[in-house]
């Protein structure tokens, strides 16, 4: 189905408004130029440089003096809005080209029309596409934000995020947690109660948000904040210590990272490496698809900064709630069951291969591993590995320095991957359990939908069994098994994950010291018998209640409450 043709509506503007119209024209051209540049990069990666030249001709039209002069003249002389002026100017030029009887000019008319529509679309989207950074420290409240909006906002004057939609494992919430900004999601009806300049107290840990807090509430929140800071200071002493149980069982604690700025924080918290680098966020930070060299540079810098600790690169995981127009991963009717993760990469093999090449080149700066997301069966794993081998062959052929001895692992985050975990374990080097998706798919609950977020139950017997099966299958085949979903960041679950036999937990930096403390306090054998009991319980309610009592008792015995 083609796009609807946009017809620019003509509106008179005042003399005073003329400079603003010229500025709008400049901005719309910038947006259109960015889009065409993206397409050029994309086509040249996918089809080669010649194919992309067709579109380069459109870039020339956007720079063309004739187009600019004519548009500005119409805005100034006829005092009309920028889109109508641009459309008029392009129409006049096209009419002149029509009169010339040469094929090449007729083709240019098509290009002109195409460019005109692109610029008009940019005018239409001028209020919606660009997220504005706050000028002073503020809370960001929205019905819904995309992960790329959240990444763009980052920590720039952002005190916290409040959202009507979303669940605790939606990517917006995860990203906010990772960059250390409190987020409260799933608050239906919030926007209708909020005003600009209103005071709001938020607690990202408990997911609370109180409008117009009274003095007592204000004091309580301030007290919680200072208690958290004191606890963090106490835990800072753990930084150099290993995550080892009193009876000598050793676990690896790694960091989940989305953005390069998080590397220092991960190191400061004592991460032994990066267990999950969500590479798609590096793509979201660009306006165009980063080239192999650009990716190599960013990846190498992060690997170098990790100082010899290993970095697991998860290949591009777009789709689901991580839509990206410029990558072509659009909103879908049923997004989490759609064109996501490895499906997207296998359909964009050149893009995929380019990323793998960049990772293998970055491997010269320190140890790297590659992990494929959303694997549902052996066929996908084999195809992904084929792309890896092609990438290595290409690098060898072109004489580009790289490493080829790279461990290849998968995210176990679909129920089918659990069911065929024995087959997958035989053909990869490690498993990392993506509990966010595993819970979403196993319990059939959309992780971004606030209405069903109550179904997010990590202690549901189906989830405990799925993790158990995966660990068993991995260990039987002699590979290590980690977890990198948000379950790993929940202090109350640390002993459960230990007892389930996971070799590695990858979590967001702020949660790392607490989880390490639990592991250093807990005997492995005790954790194992605790999990055996937990797995006999029949519902998540029973399991949650039983675990809460168990932890309360331990806290009393060991005074853990002071810190945890
Ligand atoms: C997961 O699904 O648990 C995971 C770690 O990946 P993401 O949250 O990025 O989907
Ligand atoms: Mg996932």
Image (cartoon, helix red, strand yellow):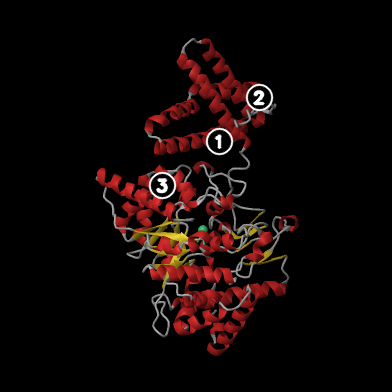
Q: Quadrant of residue 94?
A: top right
Where disc 3 sits, the SS reads: helix
- Residue 120 as seen in the image, left or right of residue 262: right
Name the spot of residue 42 as percent of width and height, x first: 44, 38
Q: Earlier in the sequence, mark 2 or mark 1?
A: 1
Which of the two residues, 86 or 496, is positioned nearer the viewer here? 496
Q: Is residue 467 above or below residue 499?
A: above
Q: Quadrant of residue 219?
A: bottom right
Residue lying at 41% horizontally and 67% vertically, measured from the top left: 474
Residue receiving disc 3: 352
| Category of crowding for the residue at label 1, using alpha-carbon neighbours closer than 10 angstroms: few (below 14), some (14–19), many (at least 20) | some
Q: Nearer the viewer, mark 3 or mark 2?
A: 3
Q: Could you tell me if residue 353 is visible in this image?
A: yes
Q: In what quadrant of the picture does the C terminus appear?
A: bottom right
Contact, mark 3 vs mark 1 (Cβ under 8 Å): no
Q: Nearer the viewer, mark 3 or mark 1?
A: 3
Residue receiving disc 2: 79
> Whole-Å distance between the Cαs marked 3 and 1?
32 Å
Q: Nearer the viewer, mark 2 or mark 1?
A: 1
> Whole-Å distance between the Cαs marked 2 and 1?
19 Å
Residue receiving disc 1: 27
Q: Which mark is residue 156?
A: none
Name the spot of residue 348 as percent of width and height, x first: 44, 43
Q: Earlier in the sequence, mark 3 or mark 2?
A: 2
């Amino acid at each position: 189905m083609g796009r609807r043709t946009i017809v620019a509506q003509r509106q008179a503007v005042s003399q005073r408004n003329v400079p603003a119209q010229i500025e709008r024209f400049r901005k719309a051209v910038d947006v259109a130029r960015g889009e065409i540049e993206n397409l050029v990069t994309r086509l040249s990666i996918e089809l080669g440089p010649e194919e992309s030249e067709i579109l380069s001709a459109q870039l020339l039209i956007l720079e063309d003096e004739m187009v600019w002069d004519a548009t500005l003249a119409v805005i100034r002389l006829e005092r009309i809005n920028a889109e109508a002026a641009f459309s008029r100017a392009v129409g006049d030029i096209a009419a002149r080209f029509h009169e010339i009887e040469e094929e090449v000019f007729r083709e240019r008319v098509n290009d002109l029309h195409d460019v005109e529509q692109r610029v008009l679309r940019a005018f239409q989207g001028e209020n919606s596409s660009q997220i504005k950074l706050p000028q002073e420290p503020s809370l960001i409240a929205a019905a819904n934000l995309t992960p790329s909006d959240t990444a763009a906002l980052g920590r720039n004057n952002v005190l916290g995020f409040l959202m009507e939609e979303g669940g605790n494992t939606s990517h917006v919430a995860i990203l906010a947690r990772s960059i250390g900004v409190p987020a409260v999601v799933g608050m239906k009806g919030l926007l209708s109660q909020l005003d600009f300049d209103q005071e709001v107290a938020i607690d990202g840990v408990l997911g609370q948000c109180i409008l117009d807090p009274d003095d007592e509430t204000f004091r309580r929140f301030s007290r919680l904040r200072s208690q958290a800071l004191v606890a963090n200071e106490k835990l800072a002493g753990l930084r150099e210590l290993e995550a080892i149980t009193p009876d000598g069982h050793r676990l690896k604690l790694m960091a989940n990272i989305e953005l390069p700025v998080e590397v220092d924080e991960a190191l400061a918290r004592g991460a032994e490496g990066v267990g999950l680098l969500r590479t798609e966020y590096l793509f979201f930070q660009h306006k165009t698809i980063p080239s192999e060299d650009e990716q190599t540079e960013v990846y190498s810098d992060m690997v170098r900064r990790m100082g010899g600790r290993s970095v697991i690169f998860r290949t591009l995981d777009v789709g689901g709630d991580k839509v990206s127009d410029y990558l072509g991963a659009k909103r879908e009717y049923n997004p989490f069951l759609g064109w996501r993760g490895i499906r997207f990469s296998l359909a964009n093999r050149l893009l995929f291969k380019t990323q793998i090449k960049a990772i293998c080149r970055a491997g010269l700066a320190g140890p790297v591993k590659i992990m494929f997301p959303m694997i549902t069966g052996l066929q996908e794993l084999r195809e992904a590995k084929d792309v890896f081998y092609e990438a290595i062959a290409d690098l060898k052929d072109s004489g580009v320095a790289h490493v080829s001895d790279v461990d290849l692992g998968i995210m176990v985050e679909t129920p089918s991957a659990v069911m065929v975990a024995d087959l997958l374990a035989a053909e990869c080097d490690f498993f990392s359990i993506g509990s966010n998706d595993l819970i979403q798919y196993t319990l059939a609950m959309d992780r971004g939908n606030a209405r069903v977020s109550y179904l997010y139950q990590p202690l549901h017997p189906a989830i405990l069994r799925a993790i158990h099966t995966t660990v068993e299958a991995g260990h039987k085949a002699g590979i290590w098994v980690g977890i990198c979903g948000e379950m790993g960041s929940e202090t109350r679950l640390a002993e459960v994950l230990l007892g389930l036999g996971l070799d590695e937990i990858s979590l967001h930096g702020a949660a790392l010291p607490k989880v390490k403390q639990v592991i250093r306090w807990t005997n492995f054998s005790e954790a194992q018998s605790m999990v055996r009991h937990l797995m006999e319980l029949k519902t998540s309610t029973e399991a949650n209640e039983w675990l809460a009592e168990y932890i309360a008792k331990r806290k009393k015995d060991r005074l853990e409450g002071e810190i945890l």
